[in-house]
Image (tube, rainbow, N blue to C red):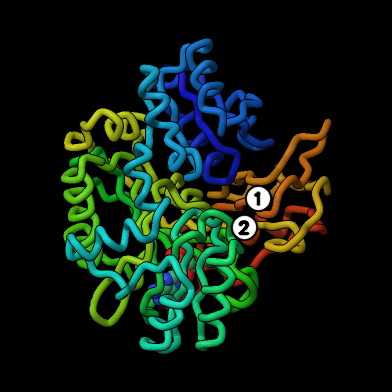
Amino acid sequence: MNILLLGSGGREHALAWKMAASPLVDRLICAPGNAGIAHEAECVDLAIADHAAVTAYCRANRIDFVVVGPEAPLCAGIVDDLEAAGIKAFGPSRAAARLEGSKGFTKDLCRSAGIPTAAYERFRTAAAAIAYTRERGAPIVVKADGLAAGKGVVVAESMGEAEAAIEMILGGGVGAAGAELVIEEYLVGEEASFFALCDGETALPLASAQDHKRAFDGDKGPNTGGMGAYSPAPILDAALSARVMREIIRPTLRAMKAMGAPYKGVLYAGLMITAEGSKLIEYNVRFGDPECQVLMPRLMSDLVPALLASRDGLLKSVDLRWYPESALTVVMAAKGYPGPYGRGSVIEGLEQAAAVPGVEIFHAGTKQDGAHVVANGGRVLNVSALGRSVREAGARAYEAVTRIRWPEGFYRHDIGWRAIEREK
Ligand code: AMP
């Protein structure tokens, strides 16, 4: 079959790498892709926000199945538009993608379905929001309702910070995403991510992961899209995973189906493991980035039939196998990220790095410039490795990182520290 993958990040490189290994795939095309994806797929310059252009491309190129990587096209309804044109697509409908597109929607769903989550209220005016915040006290968490590319959440340590966040978000600081607010209780615990593949009715647990959001060592510095990850998350053992399926994932699927918006695609639950059990912090409606770069190397089974079964409502008969190894990925980012950074610097040593046993390099913001691979984004490379433990996977990934010659880049030196400490 012919598959079109949409996206251009490390997540999409990991998906392309995995799908390219499937005997079911005749042609794999990626729009727009990057320099690494070009080794796995034909890259085409297609504006993925233009749904009519994507549909026309699929018709002209006999695309059998479209796999959507990022959240923005999902929330904009690309799956609805493709399916309406008779093209099969993997991912949630626009109505189901509200689980990521509106934090207020998800909180209300949790409240009515009894899903454990932080106590909250929704607001449209600063006066009411500030009054609620004063009543609850700090620390408290202020969130823009809509998609804000990671910039819409402020964990406020003081009343002053909370009020500034309310004014910033409702005042247009994150654009239309901030027309409404969710203010919620501050949860204490360890964060972990849990992934399930869903077909509207059935949820198949994938694997767990933990990521590192802060830019610098010791979990310091500004929040980023993610500077590294590892899988499995040792804190999410079998018993806790079963509880997450029972208390969070399955009730969500039942509630979505009951409201006429059955959820299909990857459901990514951001969890806080508290003293009372796991609570839902947020949902994402796609694979995590960089979590996907540790899930794909651990997946033994063919990914393509599982994605098709999610779309076709046939997940009941799917059984995925995983390698017992752990995986870890180190993100290499352009100096300055998540603030302003330069583009166009040359990256060398990628082949030597990829020769380290167990290592796969997934590109994010890269571009081919003649004979050179050059940086073309904030997060630029993901150096992933498998190992018998998180410690071994980390040692391999860092060995590969040191072989990459890119003076304009930086990375964290402590990815996986929590898991490695647990392994001791
Ligand atoms: P979100 O985009 O909702 O996942 O929030 C981004 C980050 O903010 C999370 O990964 C947490 O580190 C933090 N966060 C969000 N909500 C809470 C909460 N209720 N309590 C504590 N930390 C939170």
Residue in view at x 63 percent, y 46 percent: 364
Q: Is residue 288 visible?
A: yes
Type of residue at label 2? Val
Q: Quadrant of residue 309 in the image?
A: top left
Q: Please, is residue 410 above or below residue 86 in the view?
A: below
**Is 292 situated above or below 172?**
above
Q: Residue sitting at 55 percent across and 52 percent down?
A: 384
Residue 187 x/y as whole percent: 37, 79
Residue at 81 percent across and 37 percent down: it is 372
Specify the label residue 358 is tagged with.
Answer: none
Q: Horizontal placement of 225 versus 210: left or right?
A: right
Closer to the camera, 290 or 284?
Answer: 284
Give the secondary structure at mark 1: strand
Q: What residue type is labelled 1?
A: Leu
**What residue is at 40 percent from the left and 55 percent from the top?**
102
- Residue 6, percent across and down? 52, 33
Labelled disc at residue 331 = 2
Ligand 1 image-quadrant field: bottom left
The N terminus lies in which quarter of the figure? top left
Whichever of callouts 1 and 2 sits on the residue coming sooner in the sequence is 2
Which label is found at residue 381? 1
x and y percentages locating residue 294 in the rendered image: 47, 52
- Answer yes or no: do the residues labelled 1 and 2 have beta carbons within 8 Å? yes
